[in-house]
Image (cartoon, rainbow, N blue to C red):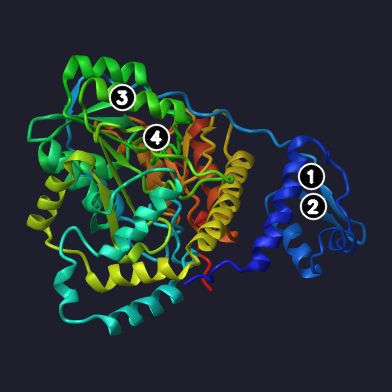
Amino acid sequence: MRKRPNATSTRYASLARDIERQIASGVLGPGDRLPSVRQACAMRGLSASTVFQAYYLLESRGLVHAVPRSGYFVATRATGAQLAEPPTSKPRSGCRVVDINDLVYDILGSVRTRDIVPLGSAFPSPSLFPLDRLRRALVSSTRRLEPWDMVDDLPPGNLQLKREIGKRYARLGMSVATDEIVLTHGAMEALNLCLNAVARPGDAVVVESPTFYVALQALQRLGLRAIEVPTHVREGIDLGRLAQVIELYRPKACWLMTSFQNPLGSLMPQEKKRDLVALLARHDLPLIEDDVYAELYEGAVAPLPAKAHDRHGLVMHCSSFSKCLAPGYRVGWAAPGRLAREVERLKLMTSLSGSIPVQSALAAYLQEGGYDHHLRTLRQTLQTQRESLLDAVTRNFPDGTRVARPAGGYFVWIALPGAVDAMTLHRAALARGISLAPGPMFSARGEFQHHIRLTCGQQWDASLERAIRTLARLVGDAARAGAPAHRCNRPSDRVVQARD
C-alpha cells in the first residue's frame, strides 16, 4: 500500500506547481535559471531536500533540466501550451434499449491485478484516506453498541449519522430534514432505489452523453430505455436539447451528475442548475442527482447541488462517503424529497439495513472533527495529481489530442486523434501493464470510440509518468499509421507499477 501524502510532499508539490505556473504564464521563459536551492530555501522557508524534490519533479516532467555546477534551467520545449478541449457530444437521437453489462464486465474484469498501473480505475488510492482514524472509530463504536442498537437503526438508518449529514447540508444553506435522509449501501444503492421509485420496465430515462457506465447498467437491469442528451465538457447537459427530448419522449426521470460529472468532469454553473430545476418542475419530472464528487472541488467555495434550488421535492439527491472518506465502508444516502417514504420502503424490502457498526463509526468520526481538515488535504492532493496528469498528457500526446480540464473530481476525459480506436488502445495498453477506461463503456450506443477516461486518483509517481509516455507512444504510432494501436508492438514499453 502506498504511503499517505505528508506535509513534506505537499510542500514540494506546491513549490513545483508555483514554478510550473510561472513557466506557463511566461514569467519564466525557456533557458531562464531557476533560483538556486539556497535561494529557494530562503524565499520559501523550505529545507534543501524539499526544494530538490520539487526540482526533480519538474525535471521528470520535462519542464526544467539540470546543468552541472550551474543549477536548474527552464527547458526550451516548455511552452505551457494547453490542448484544446473535446467538443460537446452529439449523441444520436431517440430512446435506446441498454445492453452494456457484458462490455463493462469484460473491461473491469481485465484489470483485476495489482500489477496494473490503474489509470483507468474508478476507485481512488486508499492512501488518500484516514484509514487509521476510521479503524479506531469502528473498534470504539462496536464496543459501545448495545443489543437494541442492532435493531434501532433499521431503515432509514443511524439517526446520529443522519444528523451529521443534515449538518453538512445546512452548511450549504440547505434545509434537509433528518427524516428525509435514507442511509444506503453506498451511493449506487441510493441511486438504484430512487430509480426504482420513479420508473417501471419500458420507461425512458434521460442521461448525459457520455454518462457513468453504472447508470447505464442500472437502466439495463430494470429494463429501462436511455435518452442520451448532448453534454458540454465544462458546463454539463444541454438544457435546450433536454427541453426538446422531454416534449418528444416523455421520460419518467433524469439521472444527472451536475458537479464533476463522470467521465467528463463538467461542473454545471449555479444559474444553469437553477434553470435545470425550473425546467423539470414545469414538467413535474424527477431528477436523480448523483453528487458523489461534490466535496472534491478546487478553490474555497463548495458548489451547490441542483437540490438547493428545488422547491417541489422533485430532486432526489444521492451521495456517499465512498469517494472522499471511506471507500470500503460503502455508506451512502439519498435525500429523495417527496418520495422519501417510498425510497425508505424499497430499502426495507431490498436490503433491510446497512452495517450498523459502520454507520455508528462514521457518525462518531464526523462528531470528533477532522473531516474538513481531511477534505482540504484531499482536495489539494487531487489538484496536484490532476495537474501532473494534465501536464504529462499535454507534453507527450500527439497533435490532434483534446483534453478536458476539470475543476474537481477524479477524472480527465481525452479525445484522441480520429484514427485511434479506444478499445484497441485499451487492449494494447493492458499488454503493457496499463489500464484506461475506453469511451464506448460510457454510452448506451457504444459511441466515443476515440475517447478515453484517465484517473488522477492515484498518487503521482514515476510509474504513472512512464505509463503516460507509453500511452502517448501508442496513440502517436496509431495516429500516424492510421492503424489500430495493437500493431505498435513494443514489449519494452511495459510499465511496472512502483511499490513501496
> Residue at the location (53% across, 74% down)?
500
Q: Is residue 38 above or below residue 248?
A: below
Between 174 and 316, the one lying in front of the other is: 174
For this orientation, the residue located farthest to the right is: 69
x and y percentages locating residue 138 in the rendered image: 34, 77
User: Nearer the N terminus, badge 2 or badge 4?
Assistant: 2
Q: Secondary structure at mark 1?
A: loop
Q: Mark yes or no: residue 405 visible.
A: yes
Q: Amino acid at mark 4?
A: Asp
Q: Secondary structure at mark 4?
A: loop
Q: Quadrant of residue 98?
A: top left
Query: Residue at label 1?
Result: 75
Q: Secondary structure at mark 3?
A: strand
Estimate the spatial distance between the alpha carbons at disc 2 and disc 4, rounded to whole Å: 35 Å
**Viewer-nearest of discs 2 and 3:** 3
Query: Residue at label 4?
Result: 421
User: Nearer the N terminus, badge 4 or badge 3?
Assistant: 3
Estimate the spatial distance between the alpha carbons at disc 4 and disc 3, rounded to whole Å: 23 Å
- Label 3 neighbour load within 10 Å: few <14, some 14-19, many 20+: many
Are circles 2 and 4 on residues that touch, CB within 8 Å? no
Query: Residue at label 2?
Result: 65
User: Nearer the N terminus, badge 2 or badge 3?
Assistant: 2
Estimate the spatial distance between the alpha carbons at disc 4 and disc 1, rounded to whole Å: 33 Å
Q: Amino acid at mark 1?
A: Ala
User: Nearer the N terminus, badge 3 or badge 1?
Assistant: 1
User: In the drawing, what numbered circle is on residue 229?
Assistant: 3
